Amino acid sequence: MNIKEIYLDGTKLEANANKYTFVWGKAIKKNKERIKEQIKELWEYTQKIAEEEKLDKTEIEFEEIDSEKVKETIEKINEALKEKEVSKKIKQKLSYAKKQWPKNLEKYKEQEEILGKRNSYSKTDKDATFMRMKEDAMKNGQLKAGYNVQISSNNQYVVNYSIHQKPGDTTTLPSHMEKHKAMYGENPEVVVADAGYGSEENYTYLENNKVEAYIKYNNFDKEQKKTRKEVNPFATEKLYYNESKDCFYCPMGQMMHPIGEKRRRSENNYERQLVQYQAKNCEGCSIRGVCHNQKSNRIIEVSHMGKYLRKKAKDKLESEKGNYYRKKRCADVEPIFANMKQNKNFRRFLLRGLEKVSVEIGLFAIAHNLSKWAVTAV
Ligand code: SF4
């Protein structure tokens, strides 16, 4: 085993959490919106029917609400409507709002703090996030509370592992690499991974850290098959780019010129610079239906840095060394997950919380490495 060449992959492992105890970020947002709308309506209603002298003329801004603001507003509404004849429905609504809304908003605030950048968590293991698992016994695509376990290996030994709270593999690479560096005092020389990690951000990160990357990008496998059917001929990456004229040619040969730029920041704070190119006239084009479904003339967004890094990745992957690493990847890191899930039947964590599940994976890694060593030493 060595720590210079590593093979990286990830798997989702079920948390020790009840699957019906979820908290969804979207639901919190929706409930907060509902309270916002209703308190605004009640305030506007009060402004209309309350007597002039009882009205509080302060402008209330309802864009951002919290429990204090809602509490104060309800008090002001109650004060203004004190001796006024209001319907039973309004009275009931105000009484409910006074009792529930500030309490609920406090609860949502706490839940949002636990969520952080996630979309969900489980009440029984607050560090676990709901994600789609590969193993789906019921075959109903139901999300389960779990963790994203990233493992890098060499010669089927676990070299490094990290636990993540989001399902996607792409964003996990930098922190996984930081852990490697913290443990071994240096970066590996080579990283081999599948298309789940092939992003402009990751290629840039590895290049900046002088790590040779053999990482596939989306469509790499399709391109290799060269079966025209599978590669969408209208995809942006299939359009020809003329560098000296800085324009693309659409499938009908029309020039697409730059019309603007956009910047997008990723979760890990990486900024992508995208240039927008637009076709001059799509009206009446006989292949419009298969080319795009935009209302205007077709606009494409291209990151030139991404394009350059993708080309570089392609050349590396198709080289002799790249071929060797690609073949070896499946036989290096993947058997570790097979051993974990099939042989050891480790499909669900026993403990709860990020720290404890990390210990569990650490123990598995020690056991795996020792048994592998014992077998090869015989
Ligand atoms: S729809 Fe527009 S962009 Fe697409 S091929 Fe026709 S002219 Fe070109």
Image (cartoon, rainbow, N blue to C red):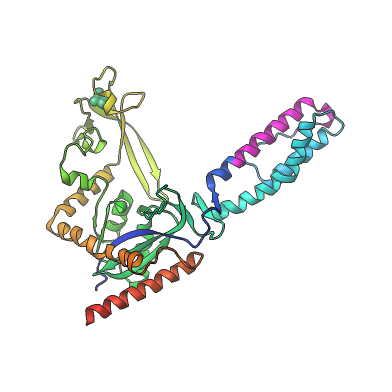
Q: State the residue lying farthest toward the top.
A: 284
Q: State the residue lying farthest toward the left.
A: 320
Which residue is at the front of the view, 211 or 367?
367
Was residue 53 drawn as part of the magenta stretch in this picture?
yes
* Residue 188 position in % (x across, y down): 27, 66
Quadrant of res 257: top left
Was residue 88 drawn as part of the magenta stretch in this picture?
no
Which residue is at the front of the view, 15 or 274?
15
Q: Horizontally, is 75 left or right of 182 in the view?
A: right
Quadrant of res 208: bottom left
Identify which residue is drawn at 82% across, 32% down.
81
Q: Is residue 286 above or below residue 237?
A: above
Q: State the residue lying farthest toward the front.
A: 138
* Residue 278 position in % (x across, y down): 30, 28
Which image quarter holds the C terminus? bottom left
Which image quarter holds the N terminus? bottom left
Q: Horizontally, is 188 left or right of 136 in the view?
A: left
Which stretch is magenta?
31-57
Identify which residue is drawn at 48% across, 64% down.
354
Magenta stretch secondary structure, dominant: helix
Identify which residue is drawn at 79% across, 34% down.
91
Quadrant of res 246: top left
* Residue 122 position in % (x across, y down): 53, 56
Q: State the residue lying farthest toward the bottom.
A: 378
Q: Is residue 317 above or below residue 62?
A: below
